[in-house]
Amino acid sequence: MEISKKILLLGDPRLYEISREIKQDEMRELEPVVHALHEALMDFRAQHQRGRAIAAPQLGVELRLIYMHIDKPVVFINPEFIWKSAELIEVWDDCFSFPELLVKVHRHKACRVKYRDLDWKEHVCEFNGDLSELFQHEYDHLDGILAVMRAVDGKSFAWASQKHHVGFTR
């Protein structure tokens, strides 16, 4: 199966679809998807000097799969939130699907997630601060939600070229 590594852009109707869960017997079919996610992430990094994670729907693959690469690659299959902190943080969010736009959103300061890995083993991990924000952003893609839909208000948009003026820290 050949998967495109071309990232869908804001306005593409596929970005608003809810992704389906992956079944255990589909695991062998995930290799090309994970490879395409890795390549798309690395290409985006090379072009924009940022990027830590990508969700399968951003490549038009409607599966509940997130690929994160910070220190090492981690694949999150069928992730679920099992806890979110009551405390929220306000951040300027960016997205591969609208790379020149920043959106001010509220996210939970911390979250705990249950997921499966490529060996179908179940894991639980906790994210705090910017990693919590990052994971919530990617998870939203699985539900067809984009950061622009979570904007704090009508003044919560800025061009990425203005990131130093708006306090963008990623």
Image (tube, rainbow, N blue to C red):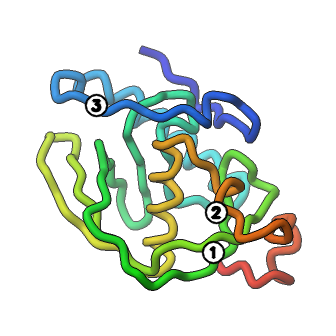
Circle 3 packing at 10 Å, graded few (<14), some (14-19), many (20+), is some
- Kindly identify which numbered label has been placed on residue 50: 2
Q: Disc 3 residue type? A: Ile
Above-or-below relation of 116 to 136: above
Question: Is the residue under label 2 in contact with that under label 1 (CB below 8 Å)?
Answer: yes
Q: Disc 1 residue type? A: Arg
Badge nearest the viewer, 3 or 1: 3
Q: Disc 2 residue type? A: Arg
Q: Quadrant of the N terminus?
A: top left
Closer to the N terminus: mark 3 or mark 1? 3
Q: CA distance from mark 3 to mark 1?
A: 31 Å
In the image, what residue occupies the spot 46% across and 43% down?
A: 142
Q: CA distance from mark 1 to mark 2?
A: 8 Å
According to the picture, the residue beneath numbered tag 3 turns out to be 22
Q: CA distance from mark 3 to mark 2?
A: 28 Å
In the rendered image, residue 166, in percent from the top left (x then y), is placed at 81, 81
- Report the front residue among 43 and 58: 58
According to the picture, the residue beneath numbered tag 1 turns out to be 170
Above-or-below relation of 154 to 95: below
In the image, what residue occupies the spot 25% across and 63% down?
A: 82
Q: Quadrant of the C terminus?
A: bottom right
Q: Residue furthest left?
A: 121
In the image, what residue occupies the spot 54% across and 32% down?
A: 17
In the rendered image, residue 12, in percent from the top left (x then y), is placed at 71, 31
In the rendered image, residue 71, in percent from the top left (x then y), is placed at 39, 67
